[in-house]
Image (tube, rainbow, N blue to C red):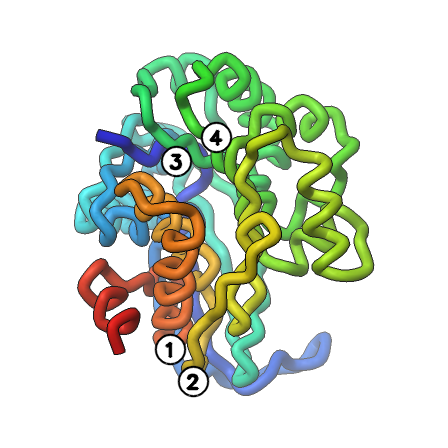
Amino acid sequence: MSRLLHTGQVIVDLVMALDTLPETGGDVLAQSASFEAGGGFNVMAAARRNGLPVVYLGRHGNGRFGELARAAMQVEGVEMAQAASADKDTGLCVSLTEATTERTFISHIGAEGDLSAEDLASVVPQVGDYVYVSGYSLMLEGKAQALLEWVLALPRDISVVFDPGPLVKAPDSALMVTLLPRIDIWTSNGPEALAFTGAGSLADALIELKQLLPEGALLVVRDGPNGCWVNAEHVPGFKVKAVDSNGAGDAHAGVFIAALASGLKPAKAARRANAAAALAVTRWGPATSPGTAEIDALLTD
């Protein structure tokens, strides 16, 4: 059976809801605040809730945040490939959601920022597995090179999923030039696709990404409430009342991979992923992906 092998970073989010961000030096009161597992956990939880086994290949820390992250993964049934790091705690992200649903993040990397070749060698990928690579990982000095070498050595029957995130904006960087030919599935939102390609429109970004990726690669670009694009095909979204967009893209990515692994064609997998993202934005918090039954219910309404 296929698995999702997630090589990204599980961190802890301090999630706060507020009307609007203050000016520099200002002060506002938040309507709510809570600590939640986030980062790569969101994608993994979405995949697990939709029937796909998941292994977390990254590190997790020795401290209060590491304990929270491990407890969340255990609840979801995520297998952890590494033991807790002895000298660092798991990192923290302050996640601020305004009334407009716009999000602002401030992150501090902890134990999850390191990963060695020996760590990665502890997991043996199987035929049909999906290896998830986050663009955040490519920004981490203690992780990027070992991860890239491991990914490039994977057999071709292992699918590499790449999520650039908001920080990877240079297709001509040394790391990206090396990684691009090995990407089987690209998943991002529209602004990330625009930033990566430098294109002036989403239509142009889709064309440029298709040229950058290897022949046969699957290109998925989310377009907010409009749904998403799968290669050149538009898959419509669902009309809902959004309260928090945090984690919606992660829900989309996790459910899309789970649907592909179950045998669905890309367009039908994207339809399920759009439904998952639509339900996710109606809830507060980072890991708000629905499970299979909730998605089925929305699709049959």
Between residue 87 and residue 83, name the one nearer to us: 83
Count residues near mark 1 (Cα–Cα under 10 Å), then give few for <14, some for 14-19, many for 20+: some
Give the residue pinned by disc 4: 160
Residue at 70%, 76% in the rendered image? 25
The kind of residue on which mark 3 rests is His
Where, quadrant-wise, is the C terminus in this rendering?
bottom left
Q: CA distance from mark 3 to mark 1?
A: 26 Å
Q: Position of residue 62 (x, y in %)?
A: 33, 37
Give the class, few, some or many, for how many residues have Cα within 10 Å of label 4's Cα (few <14, many ≥20).
many
Q: Position of residue 259 (x, y in %)?
A: 32, 48
What residue is disc 2 on?
A: 241
The disc, 2 or 3, on the residue closer to the chain's N-terminal end is 3
Residue at 18% of width from left, 64% of height from top? 293
Amino acid type, mark 4: Val
Who is closer to the viewer here, 160 or 79?
160
Q: Badge 3: how crowded within 10 Å, few (<14), some, or many (20+)?
A: many
Name the residue at 56% across, 30% down.
183
Residue located beneath label 1 in the image:
282
Q: Quadrant of residue 27?
A: bottom right
Quote the CA–CA distance across marks 2 and 3.
Answer: 31 Å
Residue 42 visible within the image: no
Position of residue 286 measured from the top left corner of the image (x, y, whole percent) = 39, 62
Q: Tell me: residue 118, above or below residue 299.
A: above
Q: Looking at numbered disc 2 in the image, what kind of residue is underneath it? A: Lys
